[in-house]
């Protein structure tokens, strides 16, 4: 992720103006740059993240109090109440709210803020690289906060999820391996979770897992399928079809596609990584059995890792973002006027007002693997 300012005569003059000894001229130049770069930062933030981009964006006026009519997101059901997961503060643990499907759900929003500054002499010397790095750092700070908030919400909605008598998370068949049998069980579990409103077959029969978020170690286990046994019997003829093994081998270091499920490699997943640690903390003493309902054990963050299946065809992960009335930007950037001439600094502050929710946790499923 990188923001670069081109060294055009107009931009060079604008940067130099920020170092003017005339405070009015300097401040006006800061404001002008803020108005120009704010929408650019918003675009970078929306395109760079992993987990944050899984959420569907609902924009609202910055002066509005956003809400969602739940009856438009749920079909007619046999129950009057549904579980909605949301964050009331940035980075906080998800709150499980039980609400009637006919209600207007108010969205709890919060601010993700950032502030940066640099020495005035860099502007006087037209150091475009310093100015560019400053705005890149602002985007990075917001991105990190969004990813952490998204991870807390997704892990919280998944950890104790159960639908139609089926837990959304189960253990892999074999310790130290992620096999095609686990893939098969995940697809079946998702089908049982993602029934239609009458618990029958959904329209088109397509609901289930579309994407699987895994660690680099899990992708390594997938690549091993090209030369290791990939069934559940452990005999010498359990290598699957030659075509499947060849497709895995030819994928090399890329991300394979199995059974039509896209593989998303996420560095923050895996034993000892921060998203895995978040799941470990939220899961607490929850016991996860295998697909057959046996061999249950509590998630051990020092040895276990979670693989997350997601149905992106369902309107489940939603984020509401405030937009500026004047320029329509999601990121509000303001020239910082706290610095005086004596401090010899130039700075900006800004942020995003947003709220994230999981309206339907049936879009999430998971596999616990040990010692990959």
Image (cartoon, rainbow, N blue to C red):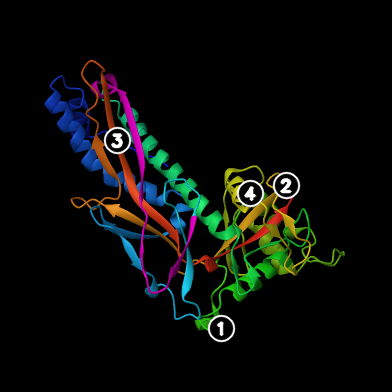
Percent across and percent down for residue 81 are 47, 72
Compared across the picture, whether 351 is left or right of 168 comes to left
* Depth check, front residue: 108 or 177: 108
Disc 4 is placed on an element classified as helix
Report, in whole angstroms, how far the alpha carbon at label 2 lies from the one at label 1: 37 Å
Q: CA distance from mark 3 to mark 1?
A: 51 Å
Which of these two is toward me, 61 or 104? Answer: 104
Q: Does residue 283 appear in this view?
A: yes
Q: Are marks 4 and 2 in contact (CB under 8 Å)?
A: no
Q: Quadrant of residue 64?
A: bottom left
**Residue 134 placement: quadrant:** top left
Q: Which residue is mark 2?
A: 303
Q: Secondary structure at mark 1?
A: loop
Local crowd size for mark 4, using a 10 Å CA cut-off: few (<14), some (14–19), many (≥20): many
Q: Residue at x 17, y 32 (%)?
A: 29
- Mark 4 sits on what residue? 280
Residue 169 x, y percent position in the rendering: 64, 62
């Amino acid at each position: 992720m990188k923001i670069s300012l081109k060294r055009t005569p107009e931009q060079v003059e604008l940067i130099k103006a920020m170092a003017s000894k005339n405070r009015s001229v300097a401040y006006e130049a800061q404001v002008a740059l803020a108005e120009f770069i704010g929408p650019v930062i918003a675009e970078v933030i929306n395109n760079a993240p992993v987990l944050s981009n899984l959420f569907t964006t609902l924009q609202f006026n910055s002066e509005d109090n956003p809400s969602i009519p739940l009856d438009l997101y749920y079909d007619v059901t046999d129950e009057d109440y549904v579980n909605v997961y949301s964050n009331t503060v940035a980075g906080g643990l998800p709150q499980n709210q039980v609400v009637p499907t006919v209600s207007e759900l108010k969205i709890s929003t919060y601010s993700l803020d950032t502030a940066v500054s640099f020495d005035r002499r860099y502007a006087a010397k037209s150091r475009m690289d310093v100015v560019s790095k400053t705005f890149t750092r602002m985007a990075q700070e917001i991105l990190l906060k969004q990813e952490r908030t998204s991870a807390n919400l997704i892990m919280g909605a998944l950890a104790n999820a159960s639908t139609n008598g089926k837990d959304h998370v189960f253990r892999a068949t074999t310790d130290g391996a992620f096999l095609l049998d686990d893939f098969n069980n995940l697809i079946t579990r998702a089908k049982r979770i993602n029934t239609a409103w009458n618990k029958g077959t959904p329209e088109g029969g397509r609901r289930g897992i579309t994407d699987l978020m895994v660690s680099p170690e899990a992708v390594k286990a997938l690549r091993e399928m090209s030369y290791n046994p990939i069934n559940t019997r452990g005999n010498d003829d359990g290598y699957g079809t030659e075509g499947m093994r060849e497709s895995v081998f030819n994928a090399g270091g890329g991300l394979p596609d199995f059974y039509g499920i896209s593989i998303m490699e996420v560095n923050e997943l895996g034993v000892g990584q921060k998203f895995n640690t978040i799941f470990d903390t939220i899961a607490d003493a929850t016991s996860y059995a295998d697909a057959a309902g046996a061999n249950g054990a509590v998630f051990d963050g020092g040895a276990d890792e979670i693989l997350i299946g997601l149905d992106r065809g369902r309107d489940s992960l939603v984020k509401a973002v405030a937009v500026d009335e004047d320029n329509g930007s999601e990121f509000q950037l303001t020239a910082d006027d706290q610095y005086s001439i004596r401090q010899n600094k130039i700075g900006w502050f800004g942020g995003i007002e947003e709220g994230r929710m999981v309206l339907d946790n049936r879009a999430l499923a998971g596999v616990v693997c040990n010692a990959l």
